[in-house]
C-alpha cells in the first residue's frame, strides 16, 4: 500500500484490514488504531448527543449578555449596509406580510435543522458506511467551531432587536398554529432553557450545507443531488426571512462548515498519531 492509502485506512475507522501490509513507518499507528476505532464506535451516538446538548446548552453561557448581544446585532446590520448587502428586511417583510410564505418557513425552521441532519447522518451510517466516520467528525468539528462563535460573539437575532429595527418575529406571529411557544422554534415549555443570543454563526445554515454537500457528493440520483444543493440556500432564505439570522450569520455558518471540512482529515489522523507515540513511549 502507499503511504497515503495507509493513512486513509487508519483514519476510516473500519475493522476491514488492508489487502497488503502497512508501510513500516505506520505500523505503530496500526497498533493504536483498533482501540481508537472501538472507542469511536462505542461512543459515536453518545458523543453526537453530547455535542448537540452543548450546542443548545452553550446559549446559557451568554444569557447575561443581552445588551452586548443586541449591540453586536446592530453592528452586523451596520456592516451589511456599508457593504450594500442587507436582504433581511426585504425577506422578513415578505414573510410577515404573506402567510403562505411565513407559515411554511416557520415549519421549515422548526423541523429541518435537527430532522434532516439526523436523517443524513443515519443514511451515511446505513448506506455509505465508508464515508460515515469522516462525515460524523466533520459535523462534530463544525458544531464545535460554532460553539466558540456563540460564546465569543454573543449576537441577538434580528427578531429580538428593538422595534425601531423594523423586524417582525414571524415564528411568534404564527405561534398559535405551531407547537412552538414563540420565536426561536422551540417547543412550548422549553423556551426558558435556551438562550436566543447565539445567532453568530448560523449553524442552521452550517448544518444544512453539511447535509447538502454530502447528499450532492454521495447520492446517485440527479434529482436528489440537486435538492442537496438547494437545501442550504432554502435554509438561508428561511432563517433571514423569519428574522432569526443576519446575512453575515449565514456567511459565517458557511465558513465554519468549510473550515470544519478542512480540519477533519488532520484531526482524524491526530488520534492514531498520538496513540502511536504513546505506544512507542511504553516500549522504550
Image (cartoon, rainbow, N blue to C red):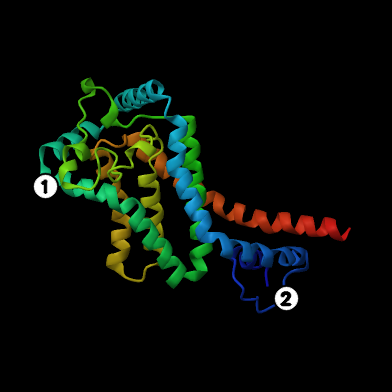
* Residue 160 placement: quadrant: top left
**Residue 122 x/y as whole percent:** 42, 65
Residue 69, x across and y down, in percent = 39, 25
Give the residue drawn at x 52%, y 49%: 141
Q: Is residue 86 left or right of residue 209?
A: left
How packed mark 1 is, by other alpha carbons closer than 10 Å (few <14, some 14-19, many 20 or more), is few
Residue occupying the far front of the picture: 189
Quadrant where the C terminus sits is bottom right
Residue 158: % across, % down:
28, 30
Instruction: Decide: is 62 above or below 231.
Output: above
User: Which label's residue is closer to the chain start, 1 or 2?
Assistant: 2
| Residue 258 in view | no
In the rendered view, tell whether residue 181 sits above or below residue 46: above
Determine the secondary structure under disc 1.
helix
Which residue is labeled 2 in the image? 21
Q: How many angstroms separate mark 1 from mark 2 (CA)?
A: 61 Å
Camera-nearest label, 1 or 2: 1
* Residue annotated with mark 1: 100
Amino acid at each position: 500500500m502507499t503511504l497515503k492509502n495507509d493513512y486513509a485506512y487508519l483514519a476510516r475507522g473500519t475493522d476491514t484490514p488492508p489487502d497488503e501490509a502497512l508501510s513500516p513507518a505506520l505500523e505503530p499507528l496500526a497498533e493504536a488504531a483498533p482501540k481508537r476505532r472501538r472507542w469511536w464506535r462505542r461512543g459515536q451516538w453518545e458523543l453526537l448527543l453530547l455535542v448537540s446538548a452543548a450546542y443548545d446548552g452553550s446559549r446559557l453561557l451568554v444569557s447575561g449578555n443581552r445588551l452586548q448581544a443586541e449591540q453586536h446585532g446592530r453592528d452586523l446590520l451596520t456592516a451589511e449596509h456599508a457593504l450594500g448587502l442587507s436582504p433581511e428586511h426585504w425577506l422578513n417583510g415578505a414573510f410577515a406580510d404573506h402567510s403562505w410564505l411565513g407559515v411554511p418557513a416557520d415549519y421549515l425552521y422548526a423541523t429541518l435543522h435537527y430532522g434532516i441532519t439526523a436523517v443524513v447522518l443515519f443514511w451515511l451510517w446505513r448506506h455509505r458506511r465508508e464515508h460515515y466516520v469522516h462525515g460524523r467528525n466533520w459535523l462534530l468539528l463544525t458544531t464545535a467551531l460554532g460553539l466558540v462563535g456563540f460564546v465569543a460573539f454573543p449576537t441577538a437575532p434580528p427578531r429580538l432587536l428593538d422595534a425601531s429595527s423594523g423586524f417582525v418575529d414571524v415564528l411568534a406571529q404564527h405561534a398559535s398554529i405551531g407547537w412552538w411557544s414563540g420565536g426561536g422554534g422551540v417547543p412550548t415549555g422549553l423556551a426558558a432553557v435556551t438562550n436566543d443570543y447565539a445567532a453568530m454563526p448560523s449553524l442552521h445554515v452550517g448544518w444544512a450545507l453539511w447535509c447538502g454537500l454530502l447528499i450532492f457528493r454521495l447520492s446517485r440520483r440527479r434529482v436528489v443531488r440537486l435538492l442537496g444543493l438547494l437545501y442550504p440556500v432554502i435554509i438561508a432564505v428561511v432563517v433571514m426571512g423569519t428574522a432569526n439570522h443576519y446575512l453575515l450569520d449565514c456567511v459565517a455558518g458557511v465558513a465554519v462548515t468549510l473550515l470544519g471540512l478542512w480540519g477533519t482529515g488532520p484531526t482524524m489522523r491526530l488520534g492514531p498519531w498520538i496513540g502511536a507515540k504513546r505506544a512507542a513511549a511504553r516500549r522504550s
